[in-house]
Amino acid sequence: MSIVDTVKGAAQAAVQGAMAKLVPLAPDSWIPGGVPDPLKRRQHGLIGKPVSRLDGMLKVKGAATFAAEFPLENMAYAALAYATIPRGRIATLDTSAAEAATGVVAVMTHKNAPRMNAPAVFGTSPSAAGPADLPIMQDDRIHWNGQPIAVVLAETQEQADHAKSLIVATYAIEPSTTSLAKAKAAGAQPALFMGEPLLTEIGDAEAVLAAAAHKVDHIYTTPRHNHNAIELHGASIAWVDGELVIHDASQLVTMEAATIAGVFDLKPEQVRVTSPYVGGGFGGKCLWDHQILGAAAAKISGRPVRIALTREGVYRGVGGRTMTEQRVAIGATADGHFQAMIHTGISAVSPHNNMPEAFIMGTRSGYAADSFKLSVETVTMNMLANTFMRAPGESVGTFALESAIDELAAALQIDPVELRIHNEPEKDPTSGLPFSARHIVEAWRSGAERFGWDQRSKTPATRRDGEWMVGMGCATATYPYNRMPGAAARITLHRDGPDGVGAIIEVAAHEMGMGTSTTTAMVAAERLGLPMDAIEVRYGDSNIPGAILAGGSQQTAAIGGAVIAAHNALVAKLLKLAGNDSPLAGLALEEVGSEDGGLAKLDEPTRREGYASILDRAQCDSITVEENASQPLESMHWSMHSHGAVFCEVRVNTVTAETRVSRILGSYDCGRILNPKTARSQFRGGIIMGLGLALMEETQFDERNGRIMNPSLSEYHVPVHMDVPEIDIIWTDIADPHTPMGAHGVGEIGITGVAAAVANAIYNATGKRIRDLPITLDKLL
Ligand code: MOS
């Protein structure tokens, strides 16, 4: 069988596999064959407007209450002590001085902590949110350097911090693996990502590579990264009549409540997690030990507890992005046609979680090639569980892939933009599914023109400006479209609004600063045909039905799907209430849309009745509907992704080898942009994080003992204002007909491609190819 036949066969099998799993479509589906989406029948003009964040003023005024700011009566303040060995047992733990210190309420260790179940690990069930399968403070075992060994509660934070410094621990150290070399020597395992194998093989890519006329074959490495949200992790926790209330900073309130309920043998409804504001999440604001330890300490002390991690505490107890070692090999013809695409490598995980960096995800759908070999394997190190961090997989995967493509372009003397466009696939090259919407060539063309890509010197190290070498680079950005099951929305239509009508929208979603509450209000207002000031959005509370994860760049699509479903239910209920005296009498759901504060017949808008009139005649002050979103089946029919092209210009100093990024442009193809103002900020924030990935971010991990050595922002460098040039953002704004509201996610794609664009620009400026992040000046000297 030829390679081409193998590709076709695999594609066929993938499509048939997908079709076989199909279940009947939900009636409100936007998948062809479902009932038309009324949103497409009526446009009210809100979507696409640059609406400022509704919570902006509250935050500027300090009126938004963050997790560690909830005032709870008689509250005690917590401080954590951390283990200083990577693996072993606590031999002695002397807490007497801490217990005797001024203001101390209680000291909790494994000796007096309440019995608790290990949290259910994220990915093992839809409601599981735990970071690892480890019991928390239940025995004397130490599993990572930095594991909490004691919680001190005191009347003030200062008293707690001081008392914890008086705790003395000794350890019986056991053998551990804290170096990557030792971990690799122990052998690699095939990786699973969210239960899915990270392995794709089509044809014999190694043989094709060996026979190819032109090839590149290199190893790219990326380091650990730690989460550094501006808001430190913290929670205000109280037990109220045997039930647990946690005001947290969370990306998954429903799952967190369910998981904590499991830890304490409670029913899910006995735990309430709220999270109205989150000062940055990026994948790190999930369930970690501190919320559970805070709840346990509150239980044994009988006091509400505030547990606010220090910056060091976040490094000790909140996992980040793990390290990778990736091989990318591409075999090509002289005119640049990809014959073999090989992207393999390893990612380090702890023995108690399973969260590899899935760096091949973007490669699966990025480019056409005759043969593929894509795989991720894991090696195991004794360290804190690693976790999601903005575009896990794609952030570092695009660094390797897009650097290698640049290397091939240089070898073939083909423009890197043209080389990419030359290998643009017509359908998903590994799954065989059609793309739902892919306008990446348009993004490349418009980005290149706006950036002035034709000004790039074709020969590296030939552009000088005084003591600066100047170069340009580019890379593809990519992130999958996701919409997870479990989303629900509740809509209450009432008579309290500006024109006698208003609506409350409730979704178990999260506002981490990206504009979710604003966009939700826009989507609801557009959908219901009401002005923005008639809409109230409630979110960030596990008491609200449904589960919506602020992760995977899927929250907006998940909310949209739920609001559409709930609105359809609302229209059905209103039609029933309207009765035979209404101008709408006899109309079916499909014939009606929302408009101008009421319902109207779609092809005869004068046949209408206002919401207020319907409610009045039915003698209702309000009506409430609650509905689950349709099953997210669209990803089974289509290969769905956000796309982009990143261009940047760097200046590298000939004396110091310092790199300054002087210009950067992101040209995105992410479906319809719902709110240009908040979307632009999402892209920019992602790009800034990408600059950190490219040039400065690196967790310094002491390979002798597994201790993180730079647990502070003075030693872990992130971009500051001086490091960030003006960031130009453009987009195609072409709606995807197969997603709610036509939108793809914009939360994570911004970071992707940036490290490669910078590395490629540095190569163009200097002639030096750096394959190891971050590209610090020592590597360029
Ligand atoms: Mo994102 S890493 O899924 O919060």
Image: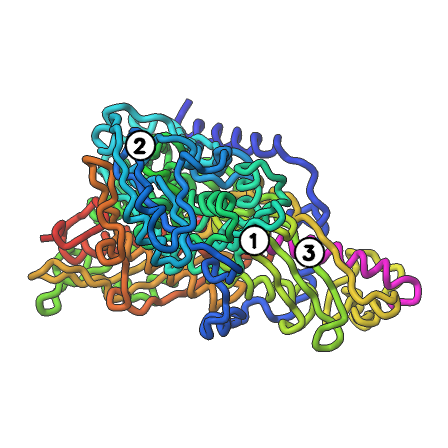
- Residue name at image x 78 percent, y 61 percent: 623
- Magenta-drawn stretch contains 246: no
Q: What x and y, as percent, mark residue 590?
A: 77, 56
Q: Is residue 100 visible?
A: yes
- The residue at which mark 3 appears reads as 490
- Residue name at image x 35 percent, y 39 percent: 149
- The correct choice, above or below, for 10 with respect to 616 in the image is above
Q: Is residue 381 visible?
A: no
Q: Among all residues in the image, which is located at the extreme front?
A: 100
- Give the Cα distance between marks 1 and 3: 16 Å
Name the one closer to the observer, 552 or 409: 552
Name the one closer to the observer, 25 or 352: 352
Name the one closer to the observer, 504 or 243: 243
Label annotation for residue 153: none
Chain part drawn in magenta: 555-583
Q: Quadrant of the N terminus?
A: top left
- Residue name at image x 55 percent, y 35 percent: 125
- The residue at which mark 1 appears reads as 557
Q: Secondary structure at mark 1?
A: helix
- Magenta-drawn stretch contains 558: yes
Residue type highlighted by circle 3: Arg
Q: Secondary structure at mark 3?
A: strand
- Residue name at image x 40 percent, y 53 percent: 154
Disc 2 versus disc 3: nearer the observer = 2
Q: What x and y, as percent, mark residue 313?
A: 33, 49
Residue 653 falls in image quadrant: bottom left
Label annotation for residue 90: 2
Disc 1 versus disc 2: nearer the observer = 2
